[in-house]
Amino acid sequence: MHHLDLHVIETALRWANTGEPVWLCTVLATFGSSPREPGSLLVARANGEHVGSLSGGCVEEDFLARLGDGAFDVPVTVVRYGDGDHPGVTLPCGGSLEVLVEYLAPDSTTLIHLEVLQAALLGQRALIRRVNLEDGRVSFVEGDAQGPRVERDAGNVRLRIGPALRLIIAGISPVSAACAEFARTLGFEVIVCDPRDEARATFDVPGVEVQAVLPSLFIASGASHAATAIVALTHDPRIDDLAMIEAVRTPAFYIGVMGSKRTSSQRAERLQRSGGLNDEEVGRIHMPIGLALGSKTPAEIALAVMADILRVRRGQSRDAL
């Protein structure tokens, strides 16, 4: 799940707590080219205010216009866009998508529903949210963090809800700042850790949490879950090596550290000799970090790092690129 999804659910909960109905929209399926993937969320209130995205603009405009005209007053509706059902809506390259629209009344059931979703996005476990397409009834069961975000079975949809994507950056550097900016635009919650006052004074990336603590201590505190990526980007082994030693003890899906092939080889030997890591633990660490794009500048290196993180998240091998 993207960090934007957490923002959507928190907004929905805030609006519902004021006694307003809200409409929760979920992309169920895409066909051809579509800007947003299945599972993407949007929430709206009756006055047209909304948070989140379904397509990048055109679908949202049609949905909000119809909402303003009094549509979607039943518990659940499935709407298809881009295949002629709505002639005024055209997706890029002839794509189409299906959207689940849920009307959530301002009552205790809705509040509990949204609180469970919020807890799953903030927590360490994944859930499956099962929505009945006939009457809109919702139930939750324990789920696996990996797998399709949307599945269908006889009259129901199963929506996988898990911790929001998180990026922990160990240490501040020019690459760290560029990486944090990229990650934020990609929907990650970004946390930067650095105990050095002078380093933190140079870091100014809006929307990024900064922790004045040694990264290894923060990582060891339980801040990582299965949707977390951990990267060390300082070239300072006092920060990077300790962060890697703790990172391999977490369920993070991506762990990487910056350095040349020679530096990486030396670090691997050092982590085994001094850090006590075994071959399997060292093998979890991407070093050198990132895709081999011939990157030189901080922004180029950050691009290579985030591209590699997304590659792993999507389950793509390097050979498939």
Image: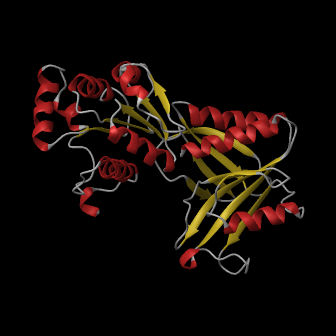
Front in this rendered view, residue 301 or 150: 301
Q: Is residue 131 left or right of residue 206?
A: right
Front in this rendered view, residue 239 or 256: 239
Q: Is residue 69 left or right of residue 307?
A: right
Residue 109 locus on image (x, y percent): 81, 36
Residue 222 locus on image (x, y percent): 44, 22
The image shows residue 130, relative to residue 59, as above or below, that is: above
* Res. 220 visible in picture: no
Residue visible at 34% across and 47% down in the picture: 302
Residue visible at 39% across and 44% down in the picture: 178
Q: How is the image coloured?
A: secondary structure
Q: Is residue 95 left or right of residue 26?
A: left
Residue visible at 76% across and 47% down in the picture: 137
Q: Which residue is at the far right?
A: 70
The image shows residue 124, relative to residue 80, as above or below, that is: above
Residue 41 locus on image (x, y percent): 64, 52
Task: Please state, as top left, top right, bottom left or bottom right, where the C terminus lies in the image.
Answer: bottom left
Residue 189 locus on image (x, y percent): 51, 38
Residue visible at 61% across and 45% down in the picture: 5
